[in-house]
Amino acid sequence: MEPWLIVVLIVVALVLLALVAFALTRRSRTTGARKRAQQREEARDHLREAEIRGARAEKEQALAEEQAARARRELAEVQERAALAEQEARQRAARADEDRTAAEQLRAEAQRLAPDVSSDGRQPHPEGGATRI
């Protein structure tokens, strides 16, 4: 084979290799661009989902805080009613003690004034029976 023919074949082979390399890099660039576009779209989807979930989380948090505040308010109201009921019960017990003390004093005074009168309002009868006053 002629040397110039060998050189031409080598040059043609190098040109073909360069064209194949150029086509492959162009293809990989297009594939990379497509892949980056898909990744950007996926990232946008993730961001939209994150916004939706974030809004839902904020709403749930607000509802939870409102529910907790309502529970604390109801508890405070129940505690206040219980405290008032206990205070009323203590006042009634104190009045009952006062009435009991007054009754004892009145019984003692009645006994001092008329020892022969019984607590049911009867006096002993001289013949052994009881009469109503």
Image (cartoon, helix red, strand yellow):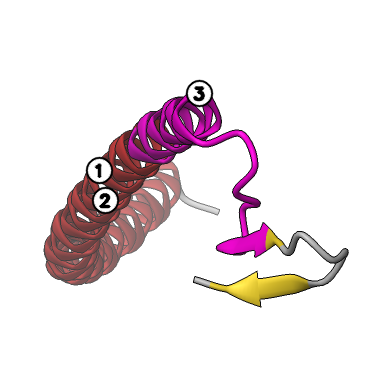
**Identity of the amino acid at label 3?**
Arg
How many other residues sit within 10 Å of disc 2, few (<14), some (14-19) or many (≥20)? few
Q: Which residues are magenta?
A: 95-123
Q: Nearer the viewer, mark 2 or mark 1?
A: 1
Q: Was residue 64 drawn as part of the magenta stretch in this picture?
A: no
**Quadrant in which the N terminus is drawn:** bottom right
At label 2, which amino acid type do we have?
Arg
Which numbered disc flags the more N-terminal residue, 3 or 1?
1
Element type where label 1 sits in the image? helix
Please give the name of the residue rendered at 33% of the width and 37% of the height, measured from the top-left corner: 95
Provide the secondary structure element on which disc 3 rests: helix
Kindly report the distance in space between the C-alpha atoms of the residues bearing marks 2 and 3: 46 Å
The residue sitting at 40% across, 55% down in the picture is 13
Q: Nearer the viewer, mark 2 or mark 3?
A: 3
Q: Which residue is mark 3?
A: 112
x and y percentages locating residue 125 in the rendered image: 73, 64
The answer to whether the residues at label 2 and label 1 have Cβ atoms under 8 Å apart is yes
